[in-house]
Amino acid sequence: MSSGFFIALGLGMGAGLLWASLRVAPALIAALGTLGYEALRLALAPAELAVRAVARRVARRRVARAAPSR
């Protein structure tokens, strides 16, 4: 076998890998982005719950102040 065969084989494999990476990369990036978002959302869940609790308390106080006194 000549060296030209191996050069052609290498170029073909390189082109195939490039084509495959261009086809797979967007889906892989999207999947990793989704996983990152979910991990961040889970990490921030306790803070979100605390903020919602404070907002509920503030809303209750506003309603209590707006209600006519008896």
Image: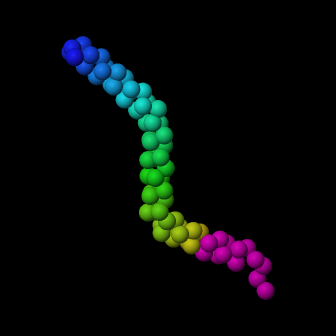
Q: Relative to 21, is 40 above or below? A: below
Q: Residue at x 76, y 77 (%)?
A: 67
Q: Quadrant of the C terminus?
A: bottom right
Residue 5, image x, y percentages: 26, 16
Q: Relative to 1, is 29 above or below? A: below
| Stretch in magenta | 56-70
Q: Nearer the viewer, residue 50 or 18?
A: 18
Q: Quadrant of the N terminus?
A: top left
Q: Residue at x 25, y 19 (%)?
A: 6
Q: Residue at x 57, y 68 (%)?
A: 52
Q: Residue at x 47, y 63 (%)?
A: 42
> Residue furthest toward the front?
1
Dividing the picture into quarters, in which one does residue 53 lie? bottom right
Q: Relative to 43, is 34 above or below? A: above
Residue 15, image x, y percentages: 37, 23
- Coloring applied to the structure: rainbow
How many badges with numbers are in the image? Answer: 0
Q: Nearer the viewer, residue 38 or 51?
A: 38
Chief SS of the magenta region = helix
Residue 48, image x, y percentages: 52, 65
Report whether 68 appears left or right of 20.
right
Q: Relative to 69, is 49 above or below? A: above
Q: Nearer the viewer, residue 56 or 46?
A: 46
Magenta stretch encompasses residue 44: no
Q: Nearer the viewer, residue 55 or 10?
A: 10
